[in-house]
Image (cartoon, helix red, strand yellow):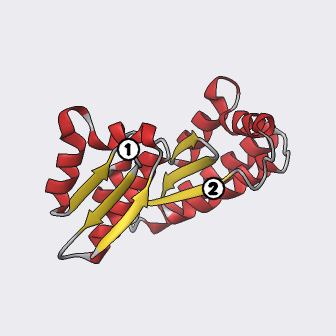
Amino acid sequence: MTQYLKIPKERIGAIIGPKGETKKFIEEKTTCQLDIDSESGKIDITCEEDPLKEFRIFETIKAIGRGFSPEKALGILEDDMLMLEVIDLSDVATTPKELQRIKGRIIGRGGRTRELAESLINVKISVYGKTVSVLGYAEQNTIMRTAIKMLLDGAAHGAVYKFLEKKHQELLHSQLDSIEFY
């Protein structure tokens, strides 16, 4: 079975990697074949054995295409529970200036908002092109989707930080509750 994916041409180099090492690593780790057209940005993913593996590679390449480093994106191949969530900002921003403003709100001054969200909720965030992408587990991605929506709706950064801190505490408590003591 073959899947097709198109990514921005400027991200093709990240998928191929220095001397083709990233592409080769993905192919060896998954026993799947990547056929990359550098001119169009089209990538064919062919896996003979495992359709789930093909989906995981698709998500990994999509993550690299959305601005994640190969090192971060390759986590998708390592952990079946890790998920990529891509939020399209073009629905909210109608002009390039508005898109820039929204991206700036998500990143925050000096990257503070993104760094705080990544550390509190334990996710990776990439703001690239007309999208913001989150790499995390389902519950974490849901929290981040809500926080990003708050920012898009004009909420003050302080309110978003407070929401993230509350969710951080809830995540800690749910992790502690799941540990069994003998």
- Residue 153, given in percent of the width and then of the height, sits at 84, 51
Q: Does residue 175 appear left or right of residue 107 in this picture? A: left
Callout 1 secondary element: loop
Question: Which residue: 20% across, 39% down?
Answer: 20
Judge the density around disc 1: few (<14), some (14-19), many (≥20) Cα neighbours within 10 Å.
few
Tag 1 residue:
39
Q: Position of residue 164 (x, y in %)?
A: 68, 48
Residue 182 in sight in this render:
no
Q: Which residue type carries mark 1?
A: Glu
Residue at image x 29%, y 51%?
Answer: 36
Q: Which quarter of the figure has residue 54?
A: bottom left
Q: Amino acid at mark 2?
A: Ile
Q: Is residue 88 above or below residue 174?
A: above
Q: Earlier in the sequence, mark 1 or mark 2?
A: 1
141 or 175: which is nearer to us? Answer: 141
Q: Residue furthest top?
A: 110
Position of 24 with respect to 165 (left or right) is: left
Q: Nearer the viewer, residue 13 or 168?
A: 13
In the shown orientation, is residue 126 left or right of residue 162?
A: left
Residue occupied by mark 2: 87
Residue at image point 78% right, 52% down: 92
Q: Position of residue 115 (x, y in %)?
A: 58, 34
Q: Is residue 120 above or below residue 91?
A: above
Viewer-proximal residue, 41 or 23? 41
The quadrant the C terminus occupies is bottom left
The residue at the point 48 percent across, 41 percent down is: 67
Left or right: 180 in relation to 67: left
